[in-house]
Amino acid sequence: MTRIATRFAALATEGRPGLVTFITAGDPDGATSLAILKALPEAGADVIELGVPFTDPMADGPAIQAAGLRALRNGQTLARTLEMVRAFRAGDDATPIILMGYYNPIYIYGVERFLGDARAAGVDGLIVVDLPPEEDDELCLPALAAGLDFIRLATPTTDEKRLPAVLRHTAGFVYYVSITGITGSATPDATLVSQAVTRIKKHTDLPVAVGFGVRTPEQARAIAAGADAVVVGSALVEAVRTSLDAEGAATPQTTETVLSLVRDLSAAVRTVKRQSAA
């Protein structure tokens, strides 16, 4: 089993939903970003999405766009992101890490080289938002062959006709985008999300994680009640931003500001109980 499958199986046994946290690699700088990454599991993150900065992040809202620009200005690259994962793995061999981003940096790096290096560094899965199922030969199928889960996004506009194509080669879990629009742009409706998750589960046995727009512990708890996991990203990168000094540099409070929010989110999600699979 992959780390992702192992973690979701453990969550099912514990009878609780999981917390998936997103941070941007290299934001606000390499050292601070790595410190946050290493501390996320102890703060309560069950799965980590590590954003790969890109100059044209079409699916991301202002918060994650700004985080990516901060990281790029400080020299973050795909190669440095893989080094971050390698450094994380030196102290944690259990927490799943998923790289989330866009195809261009991977294409420039070279698909075969990237998949080999990602696997060797300890990456478990990929979310590449600008590659539709029609382009599965480009990266999805090679990633699966290399032992990396390829996680697809389903959205409120993914209808019954489209859903089978989205799910066909999805592995690890399904990422349900709870709103129509970019990250962090609206607040999801927990009732509608729960209905959507139920619909998706009629087509797949994979866990369903829900993200986009979840900001507070209260929202995380509400969404987690109807999903296998809740994803929080924009709120965490905003926590980074609000902790920076006037020049945009990290302060002694930056890491703790992010981790404090993760602890609050984790505590809220863990109040949601369901029947254990054990």
Image (cartoon, rainbow, N blue to C red):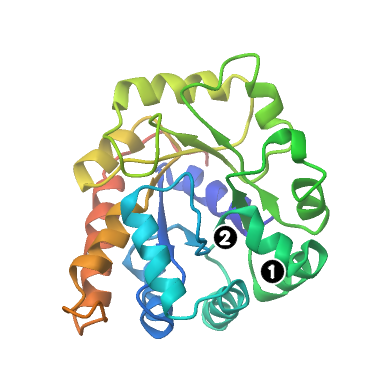
At x 37% / y 71%, what residue is drawn? 70
Looking at this rendering, what residue extends furthest in the left direction?
A: 246
Element under disc 1:
helix
| Vertical order, 4 against 248 (above or below) | above
Determine the image quadrant of residue 101: bottom right
Residue under label 1: 118
First reached walking from the N terminus: tag 2 or tag 1: 2
Visible residue check, residue 78? yes
At x 42% / y 34%, what residue is drawn? 227
Determine the image quadrant of residue 98: bottom right
Residue under label 2: 99
Determine the image quadrant of residue 159: top right
Visible residue check, residue 26? no
- Amino acid type of the residue tagged 2 in the rendering: Leu
Q: CA distance from mark 2 to mark 1?
A: 9 Å
Q: Nearer the viewer, residue 172 or 63?
A: 63
Element under disc 2:
strand
Coordinates of residue 60 in the picture (x, y in percent): 42, 48
Q: Nearer the viewer, residue 110 or 179?
A: 110
Coordinates of residue 130 in the picture (x, y in percent): 61, 44
At x 68% / y 39%, what residue is drawn? 170
Coordinates of residue 144 in the picture (x, y in percent): 77, 51
- Amino acid type of the residue tagged 1 in the rendering: Ala
| Vertical order, 99 against 181 (above or below) | below
Side of 4 relative to 188 (left or right): right
**CB atoms of marks 2 and 1 within 8 Å:** yes
Image quadrant where one finds the N terminus: bottom right
Q: Residues within 10 Å of mark 1 (few under 14, many from 20)?
A: many
At x 49% / y 29%, what residue is drawn? 155
Q: Nearer the viewer, residue 115 or 264?
A: 115
Q: Nearer the viewer, residue 15 or 128?
A: 128
Q: Which mark is residue 148?
A: none
